Image (cartoon, grey):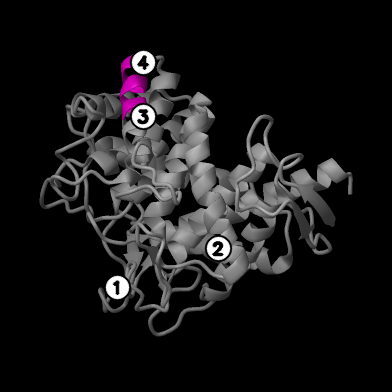
Amino acid sequence: LKHTNNLSGFAMRQGQKAPESASPIVMIEINLKNTRLFGFNTNMERIYNFEKAIQFLINSIDEKTGGSRAFYSNLFYPFKGWSAPYPETTGYIIPTLFEASNTTGHKHLTQLAINMADWIVSLQTPDGALPGGLYNPQKNNEKSIFNTAQMIIGLIATYQKTNKSKFIDSALKAAKWLTNNQEDDGTWLKFHYQKEFFPSYFTRVAWPMLQTGIICNDHQIQTAATKTLDFINKKTQRNGLVKDCGFKPNSYSFLHTIAYTIRGFLESYLLTKNEEYYNTAFNLAYKLLRKYEFRKKLGGAYYENFKEISWYRCLTGEAQMVIIWLKLFNINNDVRFVNASSKLLDDLCKTQPLKNTLFLKSGGLKGSHPYYGRYISYRQPNWATKFLIDAMLLEETAYKEIEEKLKL
């Protein structure tokens, strides 16, 4: 497929201005020769990567709790390899398993996802909070704003899959707890990682709050979520980056947390149709796409002046960027986002171990490449593989949409 794309025409939504840095004419080439239809519509190599990634997530599940263990590392855990279960990422792995259960041979993933949601409900405190940190049955983990929101994502997905009220009731309790602990300006000063620092990736707290508020018709929760989004959106700089995207103030941000910030704005736009959220998400995602197009790589982290740290790759963040680019394609039909996504996904799959080695578990994406990179060093986090699977599923959907439009 060759497609000539006028950026101010077909690729842009009506009324949206083309970014100043964009070329007026873009030639896109997408190879559809190897696409196949048998439950997973892509080439055989991608299917193999997908199956290995699914198996890694299945292997991550703790038999006692049903939760997904945070990471695999023979260096951190020489005898068993796996860490303790991680409630936060278990929460947002749930919708991934539901989506993957629709592909050939994976119906059993539905029950695994429901078991995860049941475990999360069991962890909830009477006031609605959910815990931070790795699961430790010997102690009560501290309540966590960010982690609570990530688990809401799984609770809502399970409610939508099962129609069981206990899951939406739990999500509503959690969202109310978030709302009740919010400051008047839309920030949170307690129950998060670093006191007196409010990170911009908390757009990913606002998104599940909006979901819950809309489903439950709770305007107080919706208002609280938009307050957070508006506060963070004001920190957008002229270069497109949002200040304070990282874990610490006045420092670099991993691509992972930059992608968190973008995704929160993008998903919130899809729920509210607030153009300001879309523009912030689009402009930053587009700038990163242009950097990838020119340099054939993304930085592992970026400073707020867009200076990059490039000696390692943040594989987790790269998988997240693929998801964001493909979601933008679904909105604006700009096939450049599909083109870049497939290329970056190819790059990611090349780093995925396809068999067990001395240090690596088959199928699991590393946090960083090389293995000793700064983001989640020497570990294969469950959330990296979750995002890899999401990216593969979205890529399949994008190609099917293109094929249908062209009636191939």
Secondary structure at badge 3 equals helix
**What label sits on residue 218 in the rendered view?**
4
Where is residue 313? Give x, y as percent. Answer: 44, 71
Separation (CA) of disc 4 from disc 2:
41 Å
Residue at the right extreme of this rendering: 408
Residue 221 counted in the magenta span: yes
Q: Is residue 143 left or right of residue 115?
A: left
Residue under label 2: 291
- Which residue range is magenta in the image? 218-227
Secondary structure at badge 1 equals loop
Other residues around mark 3 within 10 Å, as few (<14) / some (14–19) / many (≥20) = many
Other residues around mark 2 within 10 Å, as few (<14) / some (14–19) / many (≥20) = some
Q: Are marks 3 and 2 in contact (CB under 8 Å)?
A: no
Other residues around mark 1 within 10 Å, as few (<14) / some (14–19) / many (≥20) = few
Residue 198 counted in the magenta span: no
**What label sits on residue 80 in the rendered view?**
1
Residue under label 3: 209
Q: Which one is earlier in the sequence, the residue at label 4 or at label 2?
A: 4
Q: Is residue 351 left or right of residue 155?
A: right
Q: Are marks 2 and 1 in contact (CB under 8 Å)?
A: no
Q: Amino acid at mark 4?
A: Asp
Q: Residue at x 44, y 20 (%)?
A: 214
Q: Is residue 331 visible?
A: yes
Separation (CA) of disc 3 from disc 2:
32 Å
Q: Amino acid at mark 1?
A: Lys
**The N terminus: image quadrant:** bottom right
Secondary structure at badge 2 equals helix
Secondary structure at badge 4 equals loop
391 lies above or below 217: below
Q: Nearer the viewer, residue 299 or 64?
A: 299
Q: Amino acid at mark 2?
A: Lys
